[in-house]
Every structure is written in C-alpha cells, then in structure tokens.
Image (cartoon, grey):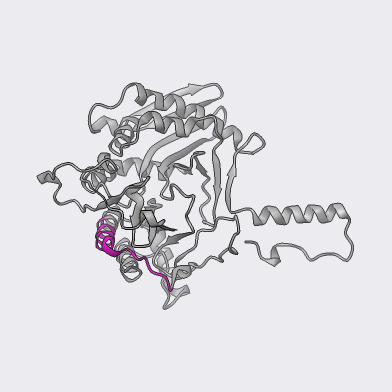
Amino acid sequence: PPSSHDFPAWPSRRTRTERRRFLWRLQQKWKLLGLFEIGQDHELYGLTCMMKQGLRDALQVSVDLPPPKPPSGADFTDVLTQPHQGFELRTFSGSAFAYFRHSLGLAEKDYQHSLTSGACYLQFISNSKSKASFFLSNDKRFFLKTQDKREARFLLQLLPRYLQHLHRYPHSLLVKFLGVHSLQVAQGKKQYFIIMQSVFYPDERITDRYDIKGCQVSRWTEPMPEGSPVIVVLKDLNFEGSVLRLGSQRAWLLRQMELDTAFLKDLNVLDYSLLLATQLLHEDEKGGGGHLVLRTARSIQGAGSPHPDLLAQNRRLLPDARNALHVLDGPDQRYFVGLIDLFTVYSFRKRLEHLWKCLRYPGQTFSTVSPGRYARRLCRWAETHSV
C-alpha cells in the first residue's frame, strides 16, 4: 500500500472537485494490487484481443494434428509463423509443448478454450519488482507473462532438459511451462510471452500467499487488513513463526525440493522462488487419500503397475483435487506449492552484485548468491519450516 509520503498534504482550501480527484487517485493507488478485468476501456484490451486471436489459430494446429510421439531434434527448434490482420504471432517449439500438455492430462481443446474464449483476460498486478506484465485466463487456470527476448530464448534452450527432468519426476514442483510465443504488431516491437499453469488454482478459498527465497534482505511485505480485497503476496519474514504442517507429505516435499533445486543449480540459475499458498480443509477433505501415480498423464485418474524404469521417481499420493501436482494436503491445511521464476543466470553481473551486497549487508542473508548456495539455503528453509 502507498505511504502517506506518496500524497501531498491537504491545502487549507480545496474545491470539491479537487478533493474528489484526490480521493479517486488515492483509491486507485490502494487498489493497485489485485486482479482487474481487461475490458474494452482497458489500455491493454487491444493487445489481449490479438493474443487470443493468435493463440486460437496457433492451438488449432495441435487440436487438428496432435503430436504422435515425444519431441526430439527439430521439434525443439520449430517456429510456426501465422500472419493476422495488423499483427503476426509466432509459436516456438509448438509440437514439443503440445506433447508436454498431453502428458499433463490437459486436453488441447480445453487449453485452447481457456485461453481464447470470449471472456476477458484478467490483469494481475502484484508487489513483485518484475517489470513484466501478468495476465490470467478468465478461469484463472493459466498465467501469461511477457518476457524479454533473452529470457524467452533461455527457456527454449533449456526446454529439452526441462522436459527430461519432468518426465523423470512427473510430480516436480517446477512451474509447468506450456508455451512460448511472440506477437509483433505492424511497425511495432516484437513482444515475447510465455504461458504457465497457475500454481494457485483454484484460488477461491486461499487465505495467504507467500513468495519464499530463503533470505532476509527486502523480504517483508506489509500485510493488508483482514477482509481487504487487495491481493498481497507475502515474503519470508512474514512467514516467520509459522510452519507447514505436512504430516506424511513432508518427506516427499523435502526430497523433491532437493531434486528440483539440484536441477536448477545445474542450469546455473538463482533467484527463483518457492511459491506457497494456504487453504483450510473442509471436514470431508481431511484424511482423504490420493492415488499412487507414476506418470503425470494419470495424475488424477489413478495408478498403473510400477515400471522398472520408473522406480527412481520420487512418487507420492496425490489428493483428489484440481491442480493436484501443485497441491499438498496436511492434516488440516491444503498447501499450493511451486517453484517459479527460473530465468536468472549467475552471470558476471550477478557475481559483482553478490560482492556489493556482501559489503552492503554484512551478516545478513540476501538473494544474490551462487546457485549451489541458493539451492541449499532454500532446501534448508523448507526443512526448518515444516513438520
């Protein structure tokens, strides 16, 4: 929320019109964090209409011709270019992503409908420092996020390794990337965007949201008053004094954190976040078992017989819930859990930033550390904040 320093002091005399304008500006600042429907009067309405139109035609290709086999070779470098009136949409590695969506049990027609229905996208404005634009499909199932060219290219380069990791560990906590696209308006700059499965879905009963990095510096967010409609994502210091009560799921979570962060360490990335949300379980949801699953495509429907090649997977019982891959049920609480923001490479610039922060914050923990140290610290956070 804005501080009192963001606004001028009241002059001794103001007209009624000026006062109304002041209150309107105040209200807009307080409403800054949250979800807003991108209707016809929204500045981004035109962009989202083009995104929906382009995605409708792009996804129709995989609806009509589903990929017959797992991706390899040219599937990861394929680019589909589709011209439209006034803009052009490109789809990168389309068949590879289509096969991955299929492996998640996501029907291509449902995916297309969520992203291209007549219902408006929702704009998500958070307290994140990111300059990217965030959109949600109207059913809140999928996130669309603008990315710069470097980040989009980085995701496409790591895509084979990313899909290999998720094939081996289909219950991975890594956010599920579902597509990479670019949109270029005539005479305009090319805009890249990615599509992800929302970790916080369905969100109707979520009470608290956290973005955890396992450090202290700049990791506090002022909470909103109870009952406020404003959505605030809290941080590490807000979580202090709380624990994740996971019961039998704890061992699985700690092991999967080790596996996923080891993968990210090998990619030489840091500054990713453990996204958490909490939700009280209803009485009829407590103690409910799940199905032992080995393949992601069968995550909700149930189990098959163990296959020798799959015994190394870190398997668990999934709850009978939507978005089960990102849901952990403890004795009394449901937790939505996922690892997001996987694009920050430990470059020379980041190494210099690390040295500067060592001088600036002696004795304190901060985000910019080596990938190995970052991974160990986040795993240690999960271990010390769960029972």
Q: Is residue 254 magenta?
A: yes
Q: Is residue 243 visible?
A: yes
Q: Is residue 24 magenta?
A: no
Residue drawn at the location 28% of the way across and 37% of the way down = 103
Residue 143 in picture, x, y percent from top left? 46, 43
Residue 382, placed above or below residue 198: below
Q: Is residue 273 visible?
A: no
Dominant SS of magenta comes to helix
Residue drawn at the location 84% of the way across and 54% of the way down = 18
Give the residues in magenta: 241-259
Residue 176, placed above or below residue 187: below
Question: Which part of the image, by quadrant, shows the N terminus?
Answer: bottom right
Residues 147 and 33: in front is 33
Left or right of 2 on screen, residue 324: left
Residue 216 in picture, x, y percent from top left? 44, 71
Left or right of 4 on screen, residue 125: left
